[in-house]
Image: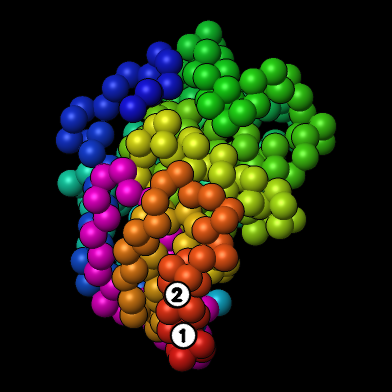
Amino acid sequence: MQPLANVTPLKPAARAGAIEVKNVGQVFKTRSQDVIALEDVSLEIKPGRFVVLVGPSGCGKSTLLMMMAGLRQQTAGTITISGAPILQPDPDRVGVVFQEASLFPWLTAEDNVEFPLALRGVPKAERRAKAQDALKLVGLDGFGRRHPHELSGGMKQRVSIARGLVQDPPVLLMDEPFAALDEQTRMTMGDELLRIWAATGKTVVFVTHSLTEAVYLADEVIVMSARPGRIVDHLQVQLPRPRTYEMLSGDAFGSLRDRIWRHIRKSA
């Protein structure tokens, strides 16, 4: 694994990037009733794995991801990242990429990537070097001085991914990061993400509604039921890497995609 230049290595235990979810539940309280979003969700994700969460709309995929990020607390069960509970956002352990790039329009690409480092008081020269390394990793070398309005949708998402990577966390959580992109750009970004994942060795948890995208990217696909969200299947994707577009028309690919669809159709 090639870490970003000048990033202080994490301790071996934190570097592992293992995720453990035990008997997790989430209940949202409203004035009229309690809504059970997740119920008794348990899973283990080994370090360095690319895991995709799929399921019908409203099944709690993004809610589970936000709890893994420490941005929301579960009402039952436990979540540990690299052997310790995740009780609040911890950029040393977890980076997050959202569906929208959410870049500051008045900042350049470099400045947007630097922003979380600036919040932590990292010296200017050090954070600039890390931002440039992160932008190079996502294929945006030479675009650091561009503002968001000067970038395409795919390039903006690359900046967002670079911002998630710049603190070099062992875990990267991604909530439908390519949903707003056209199909051609989405496929290109999928390949780029696999390249970045192979270069960094991070644990990736990726939420999507696209079954094709799920099978194409993943080592493992976690299938969730309609609300209350539960895990109804856990597929091991044995397709060889690197993945190729030719695999999309193969029987093995189609069989995995159909298996996921049967679960989703049944629970919808």
The residue at the point 51 percent across, 66 percent down is 250
In x, y percent, where is residue 211?
Answer: 53, 69
Circle count: 2
Q: Which residue is mark 2?
A: 255
The stretch of residues the image draws in magenta is: 31-56
Which residue reaches farthest right? 150
Type of residue at label 1? Answer: Arg
Answer whether residue 205 is magenta in the image.
no
Q: Which residue is mark 1?
A: 262
Q: Secondary structure at mark 2?
A: helix
Left or right placement of residue 139 versus residue 256 in this view: right
In x, y percent, where is residue 189?
Answer: 62, 45
| Quadrant for the N terminus in the image | top left
Left or right placement of residue 74 versus residue 100 in this view: left
In x, y percent, where is residue 66?
Answer: 43, 58
Is residue 220 in sight in this rendering?
A: no
Left or right placement of residue 67 versus residue 155 in this view: left
Is residue 130 in sight in this rendering?
A: yes
Answer whether residue 42 is magenta in the image.
yes
Q: Nearer the viewer, mark 2 or mark 1?
A: 2
Q: Residue 176's image quarter?
A: bottom right
The residue at the point 48 percent across, 49 percent down is 243
55 to 117, vertically: above or below: below
In x, y percent, where is residue 119?
Answer: 50, 28
Type of residue at label 2? Answer: Ser
Q: What is the distance, in whole Å, between disc 2 and disc 1 at their CAs?
A: 11 Å
